[in-house]
Amino acid sequence: MPPSPSTPPRARPVYRNIHVLQILRYRLPLAGIVSILHRVSGALMFLLMPFAIWMFDASVTSEISHEAFTSAFAVGIGPFAGWFLKLVVLALIWAYLHHFIAGIRHLWMDATHAVSRQQGQLTAISTLVSSLALTALLGAKLFGLY
Amino acid sequence: MAVNHGSKRLVVGAHYGFRDWLGQRVTAVLMAIYTVVLLAQVLAPGELGYERWAGIFAAQWMKVLTFVVVVALLHHAWVGMRDIWMDYVKPVGLRLALQVFTLAWLIGCAGWAVQVLWRL
């Protein structure tokens, strides 16, 4: 039976994307954590892009600028202390590693259609563990622990 | 050909958003390969002082490859940031402003990177 034009359409439930503020009180599965961190890491790298290019510029342009580049991380530059710059670089390292590994995971799922719940869970754990372990490894090098 | 603009624009079905989706993946693969290529040179034996570091990017093939990757990154980041704005920012004016800012930011960064690259 076709709906009569006089009855108003019933209010249908609307499912929108999760708002940023809702994420904080939303229980995400591990694959969901990997997914939102993929976004966060991408946005972080977008915002830090001028810093990354400054590092590229200073390190590669001349021996003098290279000297300024290395001393920035040793004794600081302008208002920024050396340890603070290292922390920013650490954030960049994590963002790159997470984005890279989560991206490979994405491409692999796209290519193989491996999208079962178990596989999603397993590859999400691998992504988080490997990206954090590599970040710790490179971070230790960055802060001169070895 | 069927009308596909204005109110008649087809916003569902095959290929809607496909180009962005594919472009983001192709650029991702390109950047991943570049990462390996760069890493192989950085991890080569010998001290990594200014000479060797700058030498990596001084090679013409590396300049061209780096340039391609910069353009790939520009597109990749644009698609990604646009997705973020479309998902979380509903007011049209604010979203437009953020998208314009994103483009200006990315093009500015790409210009700077290219300048550094070609004065080596």
Image (cartoon, coloured by chain):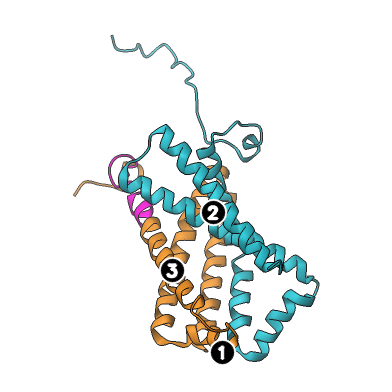
Chain colours: A cyan, B orange
**Kind of residue indicated by mark 3:** Val
Q: Residues within 10 Å of mark 1 (few under 14, many from 20)?
A: few
| Badge 3 or badge 1: first in the primary sequence | 3
Q: Residue at x 50, y 79 (%)?
A: B114
Q: Which region is colored magenta?
A: B9-22
Q: Nearer the viewer, residue A55 or B96?
A: A55
Q: Nearer the viewer, residue A14 or A95?
A: A95
Assign a secondary structure to mark 1. Answer: helix
Q: Is residue A74 left or right of residue A21?
A: right
**Residue A33, image x and y in percent?**
56, 41
Instruction: Place residue A84 in its image quadrant.
Output: bottom right
Residue of label 1: B51
Residue of label 2: A98
Residue B36 has which mark?
3
**Chain of the residue displaying label 1:** B
**Kind of residue indicated by mark 2:** His
**Kind of residue indicated by mark 1:** Glu
**Chain of the residue displaying label 3:** B
Is residue B51 in sight in this rendering?
Answer: yes
**Residue A133, image x and y in percent?**
59, 54
| Real-space CA distance between mark 3 and mark 1, rounded to the nearest whole angstrom | 21 Å
Assign a secondary structure to mark 2. Answer: helix
**Chain of the residue displaying label 2:** A
Instruction: Place residue B34 in its image quadrant.
Output: bottom left
| Real-space CA distance between mark 1 and mark 2, rounded to the nearest whole angstrom | 31 Å
Q: Residues within 10 Å of mark 3 (few under 14, many from 20)?
A: few
**Residue B81, image x and y in percent?**
52, 54
Is residue B90 in sight in this rendering?
Answer: no
